């Protein structure tokens, strides 16, 4: 039997047999109806800041040597029964830790700037230990309110126009979240407050309970605590 340290490797036929016996069905986002991606681009409203994770060779470095140094964020949309919900999280590039998040029925500055203020309050960046916050070129991220909320301890970083790989770390989190939590479930009749609560519970499980291959089959919390960083 396997455990968290040494997962079981099983032939595909064995997995399929167990799935038949247990009545399990594979859930793959690629097999489901493709949803339109939410876009907040409204043109070049201001000069773009530097794209910090972009290397000279065109690849990206979304790693960080310690928590609270490089964070990615974006907004994703959920189309539900009679309304739409929007999630704005802050993902730490040290280990993928969701530092904070907000959910709203409006993809506006209250959602995104509110999340940023939460983030600054939690991390406490200073000019001596700045926090780089990487975003796409959405209208709010280019706006005055976002710039002012960053303050002296936050370095703004932004993707190039129409280059989704420039914010791949955030897109990867959204892809996992949609596949694990949202797709393949019947959300008929689920009100916003209930959806928001369930989404928060999933993000907490993603942080505290989901085993991550790139972290040596440990949870994000375990990985962080083993390296002596406060969770």
Image: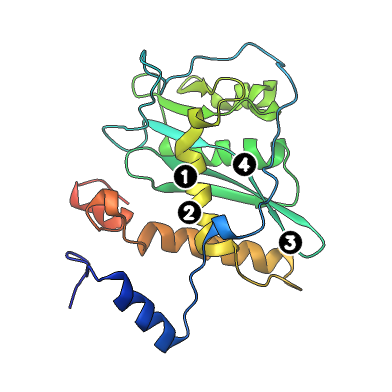
- The tag earlier along the polypeptide, 4 or 1, is 4
What separation in Å lies between label 4 and label 1 (alpha carbons)? 12 Å
Q: Dividing the picture into quarters, in which one does residue 190 lie?
A: bottom right
Label 3, on which residue?
A: 80
Give the CA distance from mark 3 to mark 1. Answer: 22 Å
Q: Are marks 2 and 1 in contact (CB under 8 Å)?
A: yes
Residue in the image at 36% along x and 30% along y: 69
Q: At numbered mark 1, what does the secondary structure look like: helix, strand or loop?
A: helix
Q: Which of marks 4 and 2 precedes in the sequence?
A: 4
Is mark 4 in CB contact (under 8 Å) with mark 1? no
Task: Report whether 153 appears left or right of 208.
Answer: right
Q: Measure the alpha-carbon separation of dots 3 and 2.
A: 18 Å
Q: Residue at x 43, y 20 (%)?
A: 52
Q: Which residue is mark 4?
A: 75
| Label 3–label 1 contact, CB within 8 A | no
Question: In the figure, 229 relative to 178: above or below?
Answer: above
- Between disc 4 and disc 1, the foreground one is 1
* SS at circle 3: loop
């Amino acid at each position: 039997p396997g455990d968290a340290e040494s997962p079981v490797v099983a032939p595909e036929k064995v997995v399929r047999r167990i799935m038949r016996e247990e009545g399990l069905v594979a859930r793959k986002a690629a097999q489901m109806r493709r949803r339109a991606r939410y876009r907040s681009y409204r043109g070049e409203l201001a000069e773009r800041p530097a794209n910090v994770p972009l290397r000279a060779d065109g690849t990206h470095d979304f790693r960080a040597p310690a928590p609270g140094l490089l964070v990615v964020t974006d907004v994703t949309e959920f189309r539900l029964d009679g309304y739409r919900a929007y999630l704005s999280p802050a993902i730490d590039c040290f280990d993928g830790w969701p530092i904070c998040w907000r959910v709203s029925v409006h993809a506006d500055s209250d959602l995104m700037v509110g999340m940023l203020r939460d983030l600054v309050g939690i991390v406490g960046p200073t000019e001596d230990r700045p926090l780089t916050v990487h975003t796409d070129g959405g209208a709010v991220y280019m706006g005055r309110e976002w710039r002012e909320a960053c303050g002296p301890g936050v370095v703004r970083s932004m993707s190039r126009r129409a280059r989704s790989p420039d914010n791949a770390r955030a897109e990867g989190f959204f892809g996992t979240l949609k596949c694990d939590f949202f797709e393949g479930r019947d959300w008929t009749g689920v009100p916003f407050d209930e959806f928001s609560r369930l989404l928060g519970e999933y993000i907490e499980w993603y942080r505290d309970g989901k085993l991550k291959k790139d972290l040596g089959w440990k949870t994000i919390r375990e990985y962080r605590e083993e390296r002596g960083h406060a969770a």
